[in-house]
Image: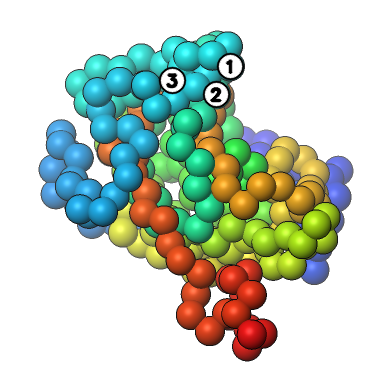
């Protein structure tokens, strides 16, 4: 296989690597624990707010109004060509849980294999990909903060198996147009910590570096139609308060009150 990334992209801030750098070391592979029930989603906490409970897409919008993905057997599946879908619910700091499965039939390689994405506030992508025995650029592998940070390890299950993302999200704070505090993310992939309170450089994107621009304190969850038959189920969140000891509520943990 030839190069799986690029060498003509901008340098990442404070980093020796370029965006999607093909020379960037891939995370080591680990084997996650087995699912408690491959056919049934787990139970959510009693205070969870469901974004998708396996019944319908009434809580979601699509490119042309209503979401047009397929719903069956307790999951929703991308219908290629219908576009991304976004939750009607908007939220900021949160604990977010979702489960996904890439197609069992392996087609393509690198970024062309089981590709989708989870966009927090519609702007900050956690990559969804069939990353099991599938070389690609490090900041584009499964559970990467796309174009910014690879996961600490590759915790992917085999194609077709259900996988989990458990996310702790701290939204960025702005004062007018000025950034007060950046976004932070902790992510467990199949129960394995792959990002620990990682600061984000800004919104994510392809082949470039993107600066923060002021936006609302809450936003939708967006799921990406990348043309692959990726499935999702059991999507819920819990809103989180600002950390204690942070008088300004920015999430930085400073003694600023």
Between 89 and 70, which is closer to the camera in this rendering? 89
Mark toward the viewer: 3 or 2 = 2
Q: Which mark is residue 154?
A: none
Point 60% across, 39% down: residue: 122
* Tag 1 and tag 3, C-beta contact below 8 Å: no
Quadrant containing the N terminus is top right
Residue wearing tag 1: 63
C-alpha span from label 1 to label 2:
7 Å
Point 71% across, 41% down: residue: 205
Q: Position of residue 186 (x, y in %)?
A: 48, 63
Per the image, label 1 sits on a secondary structure element best described as loop
C-alpha span from label 1 to label 3:
13 Å
The numbered mark, 3 or 2, whose residue comes first in the sequence reads 3
* Tag 1 and tag 2, C-beta contact below 8 Å: yes
Residue wearing tag 2: 84
Point 20% across, 21% down: residue: 73
- Depicted 103 relative to depicted 4: above or below: above
- Depicted 129 relative to depicted 17: above or below: above
C-alpha span from label 3 to label 2:
9 Å
Colour basis = rainbow
Residue wearing tag 3: 78
Mark toward the viewer: 1 or 3 = 1
């Amino acid at each position: 296989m030839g190069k799986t990334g690029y060498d003509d992209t901008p340098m990442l801030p404070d980093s020796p690597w370029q965006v999607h750098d093909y020379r960037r070391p891939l995370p080591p592979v680990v084997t996650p624990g087995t699912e408690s029930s491959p056919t049934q989603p787990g139970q959510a906490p009693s205070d969870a707010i469901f974004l998708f409970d396996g019944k319908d897409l009434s809580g979601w919008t699509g490119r042309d109004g209503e979401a047009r993905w397929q719903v069956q057997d307790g999951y929703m599946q991308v219908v290629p060509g219908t576009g991304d879908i976004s939750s009607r619910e908007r939220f900021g700091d949160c604990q977010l849980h979702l489960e996904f499965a890439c197609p069992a039939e392996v087609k393509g390689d690198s970024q062309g294999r089981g590709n989708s994405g989870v966009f927090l506030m519609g702007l900050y992508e956690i990559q969804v990909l069939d990353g099991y025995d599938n070389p690609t650029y490090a900041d584009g592998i499964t559970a990467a903060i796309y174009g910014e940070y690879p996961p600490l390890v590759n915790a992917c299950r085999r194609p077709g198996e259900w996988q989990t993302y458990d996310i702790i999200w701290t939204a960025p704070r702005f004062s007018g147009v000025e950034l007060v505090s950046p976004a932070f993310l902790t992510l467990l992939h199949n129960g394995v910590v792959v990002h620990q309170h990682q600061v984000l450089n800004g919104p994510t994107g392809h082949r470039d570096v993107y600066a923060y621009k002021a936006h609302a304190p809450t936003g939708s969850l967006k799921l990406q139609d990348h043309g692959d038959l990726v499935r999702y189920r059991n999507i819920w969140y819990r809103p989180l308060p600002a950390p204690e000891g942070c008088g300004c509520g920015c999430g930085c943990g400073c003694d600023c009150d």
